[in-house]
Structure formats: structure tokens, C-alpha cells
Image: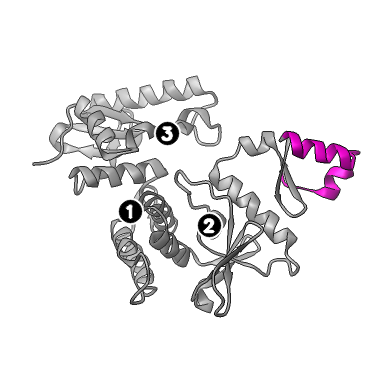
Amino acid sequence: MLRSRSDILDTGVTERQLADALRSGALKRLHRGSYVTKTDWDDLWGEGRQLLRVIAVDRAAQAPQSRVYVGVSAAVLWELPLYRHSPDSVHTLIRGTRHTRTVSGVVRHDLDVREDDIVVRHGLLCTSLTRTVFDLARRGSCDLALAAADAALGQVAVDRHRQDPDAAATWREDLARLEKPGLRGIRQARWVAGFADGRAQLPGESVSRLQLFRLGYRAPELQVPVIGAGGDEYFLDFGFRGARKFGEFDGEGKYLESDLRRAETPSDAVLLEKQREDDIRGVTGWGFARWGSAHIRTPDALGARLHAFGIHPPG
């Protein structure tokens, strides 16, 4: 998707046509000498947009692949979600004692990062997975931080919907070693590390769990296994035993995004989901509560949705 000026001019486009395309918005300049079409840009989520910005900045560097990417820019190199966040800047590390500053869309952070927390990911230098989560947990919103932490923990401690407690404990210890007195946001970072659960398969599940906690649900069952009548194994996002209900976060991508859905077309995906739900209802006798992105914007919105299905906070 990312095109250099020479790439574009080599197709026969003139300098004037290039300028006209930029003026009209048909072409977007991401960084010095790097462009993307409006169509491609509009099709990307926040993570994809940040990744293109990172690549554009790295291509323009005087010493290619010499920058160390941090925060949200490191997160996209680790395939971590940026929940409801589409940053306009690229974030890099300053080595030394200079103050953080922004130049041409690149935010240069004066951070104390150990050498063993700088790694190569997809050919680019960035902070390690653990350090990246730590920085997001200190500086980002709680929902963004938790979604990223869940995804990171899922990479190191989860296999087939089941979390290895020893691997999870080691991951938390690795986060704890980064703590230093006086660091801004350390209280949130500690809480996120303790609350993270790698079994969340989507950022929406992570934020759902956060809102459930705020509503008073301290330990809802996660990724509840159910064996169907024909021997199929299912995993349900949440289990509310007192109400005899399963809870499922339904992101739009589950039905609309070809790389996320389990069927060829959206209508096939809906039918497959209905068959799955009927099978689960039949063998368990439990009902279903479903919610989407709009219902997890606030605790009250999710609480109202659950109330409609007869699910209430304990106590």
C-alpha cells in the first residue's frame, strides 16, 4: 500500500498530477516521500494505519532500521490491538538525556530502556513485548492497556483457549521487574498486569471484562468449554452461572471481515453461529446474552444490556 514518490512518478503520473491528488485527498502523504491512496487508507483500522506510518518513517531515516519504536508504534509490530485509538504520530526512543520532543510527526521519547528490552521485530528495532505492554499500561487509557495486555499474554501463555498459569505468572513477574519508584502511571500498570487474561480473543472481550468488573462482577467464568451433541467443542466468552446464561461479545468483524469469520459469506457466518448457539442451548439448557461494541462504551450501557437478559451483578 505504501508508495514512494518515485514509485508514483514511474507509473507516468506527473508532478502536477501528484500535487493535485494530494490537494484533492485522493492521495495521502504519511511521511517524507511516502504516500497511500485514500481508498487503501480508509480500509485500514487504527493498527494498520500506525503500521504504515512506522514503515514510512523508517524508510525516510538517514540510517534505515536504526530507530527504536516504542509505545503504540512498538505495539503494532507485536500485532497488539490499539483499542479505539488511531495515533497520528510515530513514537520512537531517544537514547541519552534529551527531552521528549516531536519532529515531523515523530515523537521522540526520552525513556530509560534496558538494552535487553530492545529487540528486532519484523526487521525493525522496537521495545520487547513485555516492555511495550508496560509502557502502554502506564501511559494509555485503561481499556487500550488491558486489550493490549490480554493480547500479549495470549501470545505467551495461551493454547487452545486455555491459559498456562505458570507462563502467566512468569509474564507478570517480567512486568513487575520494570517497575521503578516514581514512574508515572505505575498504579494502573500494576492493576492491568494483575487483571490481564490472555484468553480474550478480541479487544471487545477485554473491555467487556473491564466493564463487568466495574459493574461488580469480580470473577465471571471465561472461555467456558461446552461439548455439543455431536462432540463439537465450543468455548463461550463468559459464563454467568447464577443466571444460567452465556455471554458473547459480537464484534462486527465476526460476520463482516473475511479473515475473521469462519464462513465464506456473512450470511453463512450468521447461520453457522445460530447452529452453534442452538447446539449449546440444547446440551446445557442455558440461554444467551449478546452484546456489541456500542454496549461496552460505558459500564452502564453494558449493565442495561445484561439486565435485559436477566443478568444482574452478584449481591
Residue 251's disc number? 3
Residue 285 seen anywhere in this rendered image of the structure: no
Quarter of the figure with residue 236: top left
Residue 15: x and y, percent?
A: 88, 43
Residues packed near mark 2 inside 10 Å, few (<14), some (14 to 19) or many (20 plus): many
Residue 279: x and y, percent?
A: 30, 25
- Identified at 37% across, 75% down, the residue is 177
Name the residue that disc number 1 marks: 197
Give the magenta range.
1-24
Of helix, strand and loop, which mostly describes the magenta segment?
A: helix
Per the model, the C-alpha gap separating discs 1 and 3 is 19 Å
Residue 172: x and y, percent?
A: 34, 66
Q: Amino acid at mark 3?
A: Gly
Q: Is residue 220 above or below residue 62?
A: above
Per the model, the C-alpha gap separating discs 3 and 2 is 22 Å
Mark 2 or mark 1, earlier in chain: 2
